[in-house]
Each structure stands twice: as structure tokens, then as C-alpha cells.
């Protein structure tokens, strides 16, 4: 079964939020669903490329799953 493993690089806990999921995996039957509770200035990005961010403010929900096709690295 294909899986994508993930790690949260800088989990941030605050007075109002937790960091309960800091690593894990997703597969075809188990996507990662995240909801934002940031009232303003919330962003989400991946691969450390902050310039490619998406606005992620309160009420926004993102579902991260496996793609239907695979990329193959040829070196």
C-alpha cells in the first residue's frame, strides 16, 4: 500500500491551540484533514517554500491526500 509520511517541522502550541499531530502518514483511505482557527494572517505551505503559501484563516479546511498518479525521479 502506498503511504506518504509527514512530520510537522515546527509544531506551535499556544494558549488557545495544541499540537497534537506532529507526525504520521496518510494513505488512500486516511487523508489528513486540518481546520484553521487563526482569526487572521493564517497561512499554510509545504516543502519549506513560504512564498507559495495559501491563506488559511479561521474556518478554512484543507484535506491532504495521495495523488492518483506518481512522479518518478530519474537520476
Image (cartoon, rainbow, N blue to C red):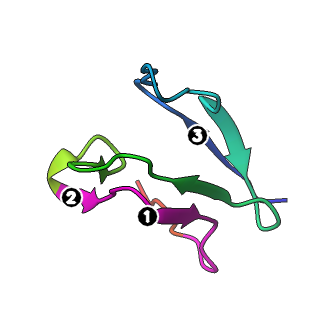
State the CA–CA distance, disc 3 to disc 2. Answer: 19 Å
Pointers 1 and 3 in contact (C-beta within 8 Å): no
Crowd band around label 3 with a 10 angstrom C-alpha radius: few (<14), some (14–19), many (20+): few
Count how many numbered circles sit on residues in the image.
3
> In the image, what residue occupies the spot 33% across and 57% down?
56
State the CA–CA distance, disc 2 to disc 1. Answer: 17 Å
**Residue that extends furthest to the left in the rendered view of this protein:** 51
> In the image, what residue occupies the spot 36% across and 49% down?
46
Question: Residue 65 location, x and y as percent?
Answer: 62, 65
Residue 55, image quadrant:
bottom left
Magenta-colored span: 52-70
Would residue 50 be counted in the magenta stretch? Answer: no
- Pick whichever, 56 or 4, lies toward us: 56
Q: Main secondary structure of the magenta part?
A: loop
Tag 1 or tag 2, which sits nearer the N-term? 2
> In the image, what residue occupies the spot 46% across and 59% down?
73
Q: What is the secondary structure assignment of the residue under circle 3?
A: strand
Pointers 3 and 2 in contact (C-beta within 8 Å): no
Tag 3 or tag 1, which sits nearer the N-term? 3
**Image height of 40 relative to 20, above or below:** below
Residue 6 circle label: 3
Residue 52 circle label: 2
Question: Residue 8 location, x and y as percent?
Answer: 49, 32
Q: Which residue is label 1 attached to?
A: 60
Amino acid at each position: 500500500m502506498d503511504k506518504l509520511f509527514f512530520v510537522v517541522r515546527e509544531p506551535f502550541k499556544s494558549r488557545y491551540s495544541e499540537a497534537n499531530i506532529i507526525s504520521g502518514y496518510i494513505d488512500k483511505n486516511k487523508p489528513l484533514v486540518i481546520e484553521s482557527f487563526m482569526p487572521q494572517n493564517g497561512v499554510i505551505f509545504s516543502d519549506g517554500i513560504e512564498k507559495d503559501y495559501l491563506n488559511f484563516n479561521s474556518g478554512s479546511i484543507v484535506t491532504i491526500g495521495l495523488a492518483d498518479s506518481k512522479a518518478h525521479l530519474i537520476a
